[in-house]
Amino acid sequence: NKTEQYATTTLDADQLAHSIKRHLQQSLGVDLEEAGPAEYWEALSLVVREQGLDLIRKTRHKERDEKARRVYYLSLEFLVGRLLGNNLHNLGIYHQAEEAMANLGVNLSDVLEHETDPALGNGGLGRLAACFMDSLATLDLPAFGYGINYRFGLFKQDFAGGKQVESPDAWREESCPWGIERPKRKQLIKLYGRVTERAGKAVWEDTQEILGMPWDVPVTGYGTDTVNTLRLWESRAAEGFDLSSFDEGRYQESRSGEIQAENVSQVLYPNDNHPAGKELRLIQQYFFVACSIADLIARYKRENGDNWDGFAEKVAIQLNDTHPAIAVPELMRILMDEEDIVFSKALSICREVFSYTNHTLLPEALEKWPQNLITKVLPRHMQIIHMINYHFLHTEVETQWPGDNNMKRRLSIIEEPERPGGQQMVRMAYLSVVGSHKVNGVAALHSGLVKTTLFPEFNELWPDKLVNVTNGVTPRRWLDYCNPELAKLIDDTIGKDEKADWRKDLSKLDAINAYADDPAFQKKFAAIKHNNKIRFAAVVKELCNIDISPDAIFDVQIKRLHEYKRQQLNLLHIMALYRRLLDNPDLDVPQRVFIFGAKAAPGYKVAKTIIHAINRVAERVNNDRRIKDKLKVVFLPNYRVSLAEKIIPAADVSEQISTAGFEASGTGNMKFALNGALTVGTLDGANVEIAEEVGDDNIFIYGLTVEEVAELRHRGYNPKDVYNSNAELKAVIDWLASGDLCPEEPDAFRPLVDSLLGGDYFLTLVDYQAYSDAHDKIVETWNKPELWWKMAIINTASMGKFSSDRSIMDYAKTIWNMA
Ligand code: 26W
């Protein structure tokens, strides 16, 4: 039986080649002679999809028999990256596929480059969700991811005159063999309308309806037959044609309802750490939440019947930030209005089922929706939010702080306007805390701040609710797949039998520590880095037409552009280095290449100015013969997952330089250290734990701590004082302001200069000197290669803690009650 043959993950090269040919001819209608890498990509993807679907079915049967608790990960973003190479790896058929392709006369890596990189996320939060899906499958945990199948992912980025230019990313326009439509599981959801009472029951009526069509992406695990599902919803019109208007020849009009409905899943909002506050965004949130909750309830009933008493035992729902927070009143609505369960019981079911992850402390990033808007779009949900709030304030808060109305005002899910005439706002974070049994931050430092500064009263009221789960990254994509030479060196050194496979247990890397001083191992480690740098230099040449030497220090900052992440600090320092070289062209310093990748939210003026300024400085520096190639600056356009996979293995220095207290965790920091780059960073987010793991001697920590930041703000801070007392810093800021770098638009960098000198909220100037000193230490260390490579090896060897497998086991134990 043909299908059974695919159930095992032991396809050999011949079988694979046979299936590839079959799909080329029979699924794609392409002759072998006509097939290029794009066709081979599609054919091989179909082979893998076949395998994935078969295993999904088996996983489902196994779970049905075992009746275990399932976790549902609700996220508006899943930044999965390219899937074919990763799936081949996870299924253990990568080398067979390589061989099969070679026999067909094609190169597998060329084929893999033909996959469009699905950009269904903005940055850290979305990429974390993707690493978690990989780990859930690898650990054989029953799990579904739920999200939106956006037609347009995060915009594509280009530069014109150094400025960011955005264009739409219609990523599905080319075929996408991974997604499989599941019409049998479609959902109908309601919006707008009004609530009336009939026979003592709330009835939500006169609504508009949209259809949610699920689109399933198989998620393979490494070294296991478990394949989970990422179910992404696409919106469609609920009714077909309005036939009367069709008959009258008004074809466009008859479809107008449909066009509106389809808008809902059209585009990913490109904001990171700043809400858009738009009605369509609220509808997106409700749309995917309502589809997902209905879907998981239907699954529960199929498997367990109609008895709600067992629901919380079988279902755990994780809210990835507050974006899906409307799930709390949605489940309440179903329990109360459709299942006749009383309020208090419904709330306790919710609290057993939900938990919420906070990813940011930035005040402007915390979502609040105008009460009026929720009332208009989701009138029943607004009533239920009021009911939850009333119960919370008048029983729970009242018991803890009797008669304290000030406390009630502070903790209310509804924020009262500060000025008369202002609007009431619904605090989605408070709704999430009140509706959940656990709330977690994403690194130890961050979770501490969640307790002490973000939700101190909640922590007093419910001392066990706020917990920490430090983020992690999947070692499959971020070491094995992106850095195969290093993966092989590790295998050759510590073995690759079932027991020693670091791919499944990253703490096994610890054994590499024994080789940190070994000259032969150091030589191999350094040679691999060098090879990665040669390959990456070719990418830079192709994308930017800039020549960089693999002998230079590759110093990298790749992440969303945000003032708190302080790309501007990096820029000011580069400008100073350039001036130092101009003053003294024979300065005995190693060659350095500063590499950036970052997208700015289209509406974020200062962030865009920083991109423009970096590009202008790059142009000046790269074309100045006087400095003899000692300094280069590269800003790669259109930073995304597939580019990160090429940059990170080639990095020597990892820039993690946020203002202390602002980067919740960071996950790029982990990927770099795992691949043997040394971190220059502040004591922020997971940098603190990275420093703990590698030891203070193996990381370049600089700058103000969280406490010092608070102290300085308390004392009062004037950036002009720093500006006036640091001649080098003053000179580069004056240069930025002078218009010299952008003569056709002399005021171009004003927004940046004003942000620095008029307030400097992110304390860039305060940390400048310490940052510059840290870089001097980096150079000093680079000049002692045995020390450098020892440190680099210790970094790789010490990253065991930062596997997303460990993160997921933490969630399973402390939050989901699954292990
Ligand atoms: C509604 C607007 C909005 C959009 C996105 C607000 C907030 C966000 C995200 C929470 C921003 C984000 O991606 N946060 C990052 O989450 C990562 C995973 O936990 C952390 O590693 C990063 O430090 C954090 O900035």
Image (spheres, rainbow, N blue to C red):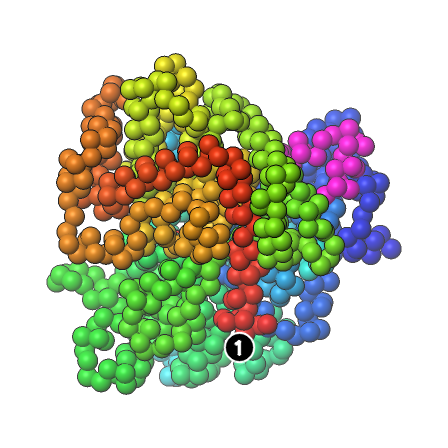
Determine which quarter of the picture holds residue 14.
top right
Q: Residues within 10 Å of mark 1 (few under 14, many from 20)?
A: some
Depth check: give the residue in front, 347 or 508: 508
The residue pinned by badge 1 equals: 312
As drawn, is 715 to the left or to the right of 158?
Answer: left
Q: Is residue 709 above or below residue 744?
A: below
Counting from the top left corner in percent of width and height, residue 388 is at 34, 76
Read off the magenta span: 94-118
Q: Is residue 100 magenta?
A: yes
Depth check: give the residue in front, 389 or 458: 458
Quadrant in the picture for the N terminus? bottom right
The amino acid at mark 1 is Ala
As drawn, is 267 to the left or to the right of 522?
Answer: left
Instruction: Give the residue displayed 19% in from the left and 84% down from the top.
Output: 403
As drawn, is 406 to the left or to the right of 411?
Answer: left
Extreme-left residue of the structure? 420
Counting from the top left corner in percent of width and height, residue 174 is at 59, 36
Determine which quarter of the picture holds residue 646.
top right
Quadrant in the picture for the C terminus? bottom right
Counting from the top left corner in percent of width and height, residue 729 is at 23, 33
